[in-house]
Amino acid sequence: MNRVPYLLLGFILLVGKVSAQETINLSLPDAIALAQKNRAAAIKADLDIQKGDAQIAEVRANALPKLNVVSSTTYNPLLQENVLPGEIFGAPGRTIKVAFGQKWSSANMLQLTQVLFNQSVFTGLKAAKSTKEFYILNRELTQTDLIEKVAQAYFQVYKSQQMLQNLDVNLELTNKTVKIIKGLYDAGLATKIDYDRTRVAVNNANASRQQVANAVELSKNALKFMVGLAMETDIVLPQNSFDPLVLLDNETSPSYNDRIELKVLNKQIELLNWKMKASISEYYPSAALSASYGWLGQGKKMPWFYGKNDGVFWGDMSSIALNINIPIFNGFATKSRIAQNKIDIEKANADLQETKNSMNLALKNSQTLLNNSLITISNQEANVTLAQSVLTNTQNNYRYGLATLNDLLEAERSLSEARNNLTNARLDYKMGEIDYLKSQGKLNTLSNSTQPSL
């Protein structure tokens, strides 16, 4: 049986599967743009703005004319009887029961109502406009939060990849050591236990590499979920992802006027003030104009289908009314609502002040963290250089019998640890950089490819 066609078919399917996996170069601005486009929080923030437009239209409708058609058909099985003096009917001294109305009646009206003055309607319209402005600010706040989370996930991927590179370098060094020990062992210059120990070190390094490789995939999956990419998509990060982005500015009195968090809180206080004004508007009188026109049918039969010849009589009617409502006393309910509104405003002002204090604390802490991280990075870079030099000297000494295998393995571990410490220091700097940009209200600069100047 010829198996070549089946092998060829399997190869085609395999190639098709591989080619279906998309690979993209993902910069931080690209990741942020994808998250702002695909994440549910960003989508809902945009929908809230549309909701704000609908709320404005809803409140505005209260000030527009309202037109309704009202139809009411009534059947009276028993007509109410009224007792009248007989003099009305030419029977003095007698009392006569008289039934008024008809068995059937049908009123069909066209009603028009127009608000002339209602302070709560006008206040509600202004409050609805402020609500839409709040939704716009909330969308900006949501985007800022997304930038922060995406940046943190992004740099976690870079850290995992860097740790994997460190392990690869360490594994290469350990493999070289195994070859050296193997050569010495074959020449009778090293013991078997030394050779076995180096092989154990390689196995341990391979196991550690597999763990870190898994961590790379997990961090990539977390980032892909954050930005809304399919799990099958392979992402590649630029090599300069850990380069510093910000220049420290140790200003002592920063301005927080541009912080979106404060804008949102101020808008919330504005909305609470509108809520209080809506409560105050309950003290105001209201006036509305109403007009109606319709037809009334009465008779012994269902009026809809009969006329005068059937004992059903139709007649038109109309009315125009001016309705004025003047509130006098409602048991201090309005006063109580206003008191509650004032308390809510005071609580919001307290939150605003505390937020300002926390922003100042965050700025100072981020400045300290960045300065310390820069010092740590410098120290760790020097430490990596020193550990590399120690390893080189130890390798040379081991060849000449001036160093033990323990010294050699320890030098390799020290170099690996120094590289990992440098990677962690760089990650700490990037996390501090995010906090610093956030404290400055400039996280959106991460969406740009240019370096922000602060």
Image (tube, rainbow, N blue to C red):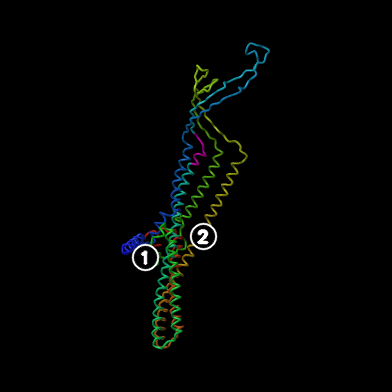
> Which stretch appears magenta?
115-124
The residue depicted at 50 percent of the width and 35 percent of the height is: 117
Amino acid type, mark 1: Pro
Q: CA distance from mark 2 to mark 1?
A: 34 Å
The image quadrant of residue 38 is bottom left
The residue depicted at 42 percent of the width and 63 percent of the height is: 220
Q: Visible in this render: residue 282?
A: yes
Q: Mark 2 vs mark 1: give the one in front.
A: 1
The image quadrant of residue 158 is bottom left
Amino acid type, mark 2: Ser
Give left or right: position of 170 versus 311.
Answer: left
Image quarter of the N terminus? bottom left
Q: Visible in this render: residue 379?
A: no
**Local crowd size for mark 2, using a 10 Å CA cut-off: few (<14), some (14–19), many (≥20):** few
Q: x, y percentage for residue 32?
A: 40, 58
The residue depicted at 43 percent of the width and 51 percent of the height is: 43
Membership of 39 in magenta stretch: no
Q: x, y percentage for residue 270?
A: 50, 48
Q: What kind of secondary structure does the magenta stretch mostly adopt?
A: helix
